Image (cartoon, rainbow, N blue to C red):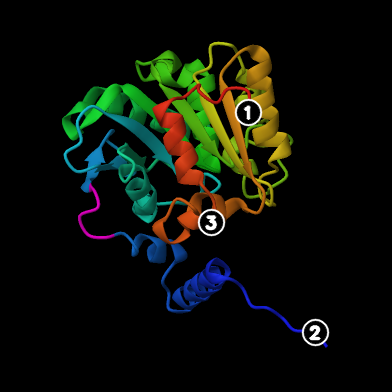
Amino acid sequence: MSSWIGPGPRGLFEILLVAGLALGLLAACSPLTLLNGAIPDGASQATQGLAYGTLPRQRLDIYAPPNAAHAPVVVFFYGGSWRSGERADYRFAGDALASRGIVAVIADYRLYPEARYPAFLQDAAQVVAWTQQHIGAYGGDPRRVFVAGHSAGGYIAAMLALDARWLHGAGTAPATLAGWIGLAGPYDFLPIVARDVRPVFLFPDTPPDSQPIHHVSAAAPPGLLLAGAADSTVDPQRNSVSLALALRAAGACARLVEYPDLGHKLLVGALSRPLRWRAPVLDDVSAFVAAPCAAQGE
């Protein structure tokens, strides 16, 4: 005779959370809304809807720790295959960073079909330039600005850090960045297999230099590449692992962290208060921001 031993407290919590997310979907409430709903009132000082350009989607939100002064800054770009996403959905990411003493900038950028490559990179570069010019008024240190992103946003962060064209076009440079952080980013995805992504990158005439892997150099800012080994959306070996190894071979500082049981969405979800126990994503990001090159060689 055999018996089934139920999940421990954490496993049970995850089951309940997934059930809650499912109920939320049935009630027309997105999982991101539920994650944002776990943020306590007053957890950060939020400033929303600031314009970094003249177009409707060129807006950003800032989440600062209470009484922040000369705090490090992370500019975060969300994913969504360059076709979807709203900065308000990622309030949980701003809250996570602010809870660790980091000023977070969460920005919208133009999406397909309004924009194709490289328009979203140009928008993102404007966000960084705006941040460096104005973040001091919100408690951030303009000399310690990091770029970060998840999935398509991780691609954007990598391109800003590695391909100088985009920041130069906005009047700044990769050398001014304190570092960059990619969460499950696609860094080497030619030929493009996903049909919904093909028109974003001008398929079949996608420029080879649209790929971050082609911009590796010793001059790259310090990088932190995070990946879930269970990611079936963006291959962690071809993308995060290969880019980290290439950066190290070129003499750049690149830290790679792989989480054995995380998939694509849970990697960024682990920043939220309900899911932080699932993997130390926030701990790893915070440690990197505090000392970008301390873990070189891991």
- Please report the residue visible at 19 percent of the width from the left and 30 percent of the height from the top: 69
In the displayed structure image, the side of residue 58 where residue 277 appears, left or right: right
Magenta residue check for 27: no
Q: Position of residue 96 (x, y in %)?
A: 37, 48
Closest to the observer, 200 or 259: 259
- Please report the residue visible at 43 percent of the width from the left and 74 percent of the height from the top: 28
- Please report the residue visible at 75 percent of the width from the left and 84 percent of the height from the top: 3
Task: Name the N-terminal-most of marks 3 and 2.
Answer: 2
Residue with the mark numbered 1: 298
- Going by the numbered disc 1, the residue's amino acid type is Glu
Q: Residues within 10 Å of mark 2 (few under 14, many from 20)?
A: few
Residue with the mark numbered 2: 2
Residue 278 is marked as: 3
- Please report the residue visible at 53 percent of the width from the left and 70 percent of the height from the top: 9
Q: Nearer the viewer, mark 1 or mark 2?
A: 2
Magenta stretch mostly in which secondary structure?
loop
**Which image quadrant for residue 144?**
top left
Q: Position of residue 123 (x, y in %)?
A: 39, 32
| Residue 226 seen | yes
Task: Name the N-terminal-most of marks 3 and 1.
Answer: 3
> Which stretch did the figure color magenta?
40-44
Closest to the observer, 112 or 218: 218
